[in-house]
Image (cartoon, rainbow, N blue to C red):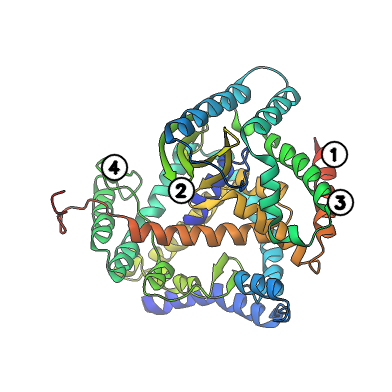
Amino acid sequence: MTKLHRRLRQGLALTVPALALATALSGCATAPPKSDTADYQAYQQLNDPLEPTNRVFYNVNDKLDTYFMKPVAEGYVHITTQGIRNHVGDFASNIGEPARMLNFMAEGHSKDAGTSMVRFLVNSTVGIGGIFDPASAIGYPETDTDFGLTLATWGVPAGPYLYLPLFGPSGVRDAANYPVEWFATPMEAAPASAALSDFGYSETGLHLVNTRAELIQPIDQIKATALDPYATFRSLYRQSRASQLQQIEQRDNRTWPDWYRQPAQ
Amino acid sequence: MHFRRFILGAIASAPMLAAMAGAAQALPPDQAKSFITQSGDKLVGIVNGGGSESQKAGQLRDLVNQIVAVDQVGDYVLGRYNNVATPAQKQQFQTLFHQLLSYNITYQIKAYQGVTFTTNSATPQGDDVLVDTTIATPGKAPADVGWVVEDDAGQPKIIDVIVAGTSLRITTRNDYAGVITDNGGQVSALLNAMQNQISKISAAQ
């Protein structure tokens, strides 16, 4: 089996059941009449026409999380230290640097692309495969982007909100990130092998558990204090994406080599 | 990655909800910074100090009433439904909002044991000032939290908390609006949900 076939099979194993479920349950919110100006404007601004379906998936994910992911994450916290969890996070972050570099290039942000490149080179070597993050210490902190944000810099609107089975909060534009992220990893450059596939599964699983472990207390708190956790997560997601886009457009990190010298003030 | 970051940051600042205030004078950045430093020191002093959890909860409630424009929080959070709610509903909403805010502030005080608070810069934003701080809790990554401070009748008051680009007042307004729109635009549904939440939390404490 070729590497591409293997990766496609992995991806389809996750997405086909999710999409089938989505199709089976698809339903739309009823828009208020245009004569009701305030309600209609609020509906347009909310941009969540699939809210009934999204809420079904939110509830499904919530159950999966409550009875599977959260207990696993709590067990993981019990057997690891914060230091170990930080290193696991650094390792997963390092694997994502090549994809970030490509996205920054596509966005026309060469300096940020350079930062991602330097981070990947330094952390993969001096940082022992990304377990440590010496790049931040020498002035190249992690800068985040993804294909959804790349599309945003190209002027693609966010589109309706989507709550995806397994993946969680997203949108029509941002969902395009998942297939791109799936293939833009360093593992794609290595020859296909069963061991590599196993590594890919293990890394993805560990990253998921590690991330969930960091969110135990925050998610518990949102669920305990929000009146409508679905609406709260939707609001946080949208504000966060808008903020990320703003940061990308405003950022001017230093990069080696210094391709764009700043004019003297 | 980004989702993890904003949620972590948002929670680190959970003790401070804020709201939009009315027209005000421009506040000097230094005064806002000093106000946030003093408020942060008081907050840390209460959380890390002695006394029972209920004593700390009471002290925190008093502190928040002093430093946050809580009534304006309610007005902002109710948003466009201020025009729909009856005067009695508005009054009930404010009462419930004060109670709910108190419960949310004191939720999981233990989780903030050992918290430290560092004030960084203060930047004017129109008539308001955004004060950047770093909040660190043992065993967790430090969170950058921005506090929007406004001059409220001569006194600096917090009107919003910004974490990783997310505004807590906007998040809360959207949370509450979700309840109302899911119940046919009825403000009474929000009041019921708030009352139920208060009952649930007080039963658990």
Q: Residue at the spot x=83%, y=53% of the render?
A: B87
Q: Do the residues at discs 3 and 4 belong to one chain?
A: no
SS for dot 4: helix
Residue linked to disc 4: A134
Q: Mark 2 lies on which chain?
A: B
Estimate the x, y position of residue B172 in percent, counting from the top left.
66, 52
Figure quadrant of residue A1: bottom left
Q: Quadrant of the C terminus of chain B?
A: top right
How far apart, in angstroms, are the residues tagged by discs 3 and 2? Answer: 34 Å
Residue linked to disc 2: B126
Residue linked to disc 1: B203
Q: Mark 4 lies on which chain?
A: A
Q: Is residue A206 above or below residue A30?
A: above
Disc 4 crowd rating (10 Å Cα; few below 14, some 14-19, many 20+) is some
Q: Which chain carries label 3?
A: B
Q: Do the residues at discs 3 and 2 belong to one chain?
A: yes
Q: Do the residues at discs 4 and 1 belong to one chain?
A: no
Disc 1 crowd rating (10 Å Cα; few below 14, some 14-19, many 20+) is few
Is label 2 in contact with label 1 (beta carbons under 8 Å)? no
